[in-house]
Structure formats: structure tokens, C-alpha cells
Image (spheres, helix red, strand yellow):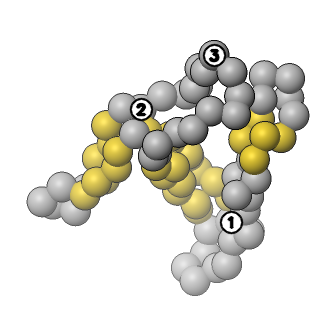
């Protein structure tokens, strides 16, 4: 069974000349004065561990400080 090894939220992700993953603007929390607030862009980089070709079902949920789901894209 596949599982998430890590997930990193950043403002820009890219591959360098050696095809290594690079990330700029890594953060673990977003702070806004009020919600909803637009986030112009961001990258969610996720690494799963499992068997080759295994299909993985997952969801991304954005929570408010009150622990309510704000968005589930």
C-alpha cells in the first residue's frame, strides 16, 4: 500500500540541469488577515512510496484556523 513520504508547499518548484527537484519559498503555514484570500500560485510537491505502477487516491484540503474545510480542490 502506498503512503505519503513527504509533502512540501512552496512558491516555486523546478528541475535543475541534472533533473533534481529544486524549491524556492518553502513554508509550513500561510498567514492571512482574513479568509478567503487569493493565493496567486503555489506548488504542492508530494512524494509517495509504494509499488511501481500502484495507483494512489489522495485529497488536498485547506483548513481555516477554526478547523473548518475552506476548500477541497
> Which of 25 and 56 lies nearest the eye of the viewer?
25
Q: Secondary structure at mark 2?
A: loop
Q: In the picture, which quadrant includes the C terminus?
A: bottom right
In the image, is residue 21 above or below residue 38? below
Q: In the shown orientation, is residue 45 left or right of residue 61? A: left
> Which of 65 and 4 lies nearest the eye of the viewer?
65
- For marks 2 and 3, the one nearer the N-term is 2
Q: Secondary structure at mark 1?
A: loop
User: Mark 2 and mark 3: span between their CA atoms?
Assistant: 20 Å
Mark closer to the observer (2, 3): 3
The residue at which mark 3 appears reads as 33
Give the residue at x 22% y 62%.
Answer: 19
- For marks 3 and 1, the one nearer the N-term is 1
Mark closer to the observer (3, 1): 3
User: Mark 1 and mark 2: span between their CA atoms?
Assistant: 25 Å
> Which of 33 and 1 lies nearest the eye of the viewer?
33
Label annotation for residue 26: 2
Q: Secondary structure at mark 3?
A: loop
The residue at which mark 1 appears reads as 2
Residue 18 image point, x, y percent? 15, 60
Residue 36 image point, x, y percent? 70, 34
How crowded is the residue under tag 2: few (<14 C-alpha within 10 Å), some, or many (20+)?
A: some
Amino acid at each position: 500500500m502506498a503512503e505519503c513520504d513527504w509533502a512540501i508547499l512552496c512558491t516555486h518548484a523546478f528541475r535543475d540541469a541534472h533533473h533534481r527537484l529544486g524549491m524556492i519559498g518553502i513554508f509550513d503555514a500561510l498567514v492571512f488577515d482574513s479568509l478567503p484570500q487569493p493565493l496567486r500560485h503555489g506548488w504542492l510537491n508530494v512524494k509517495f512510496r509504494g509499488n511501481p505502477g500502484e495507483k494512489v487516491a489522495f485529497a488536498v484540503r485547506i483548513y481555516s484556523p477554526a478547523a473548518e474545510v475552506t476548500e477541497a480542490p
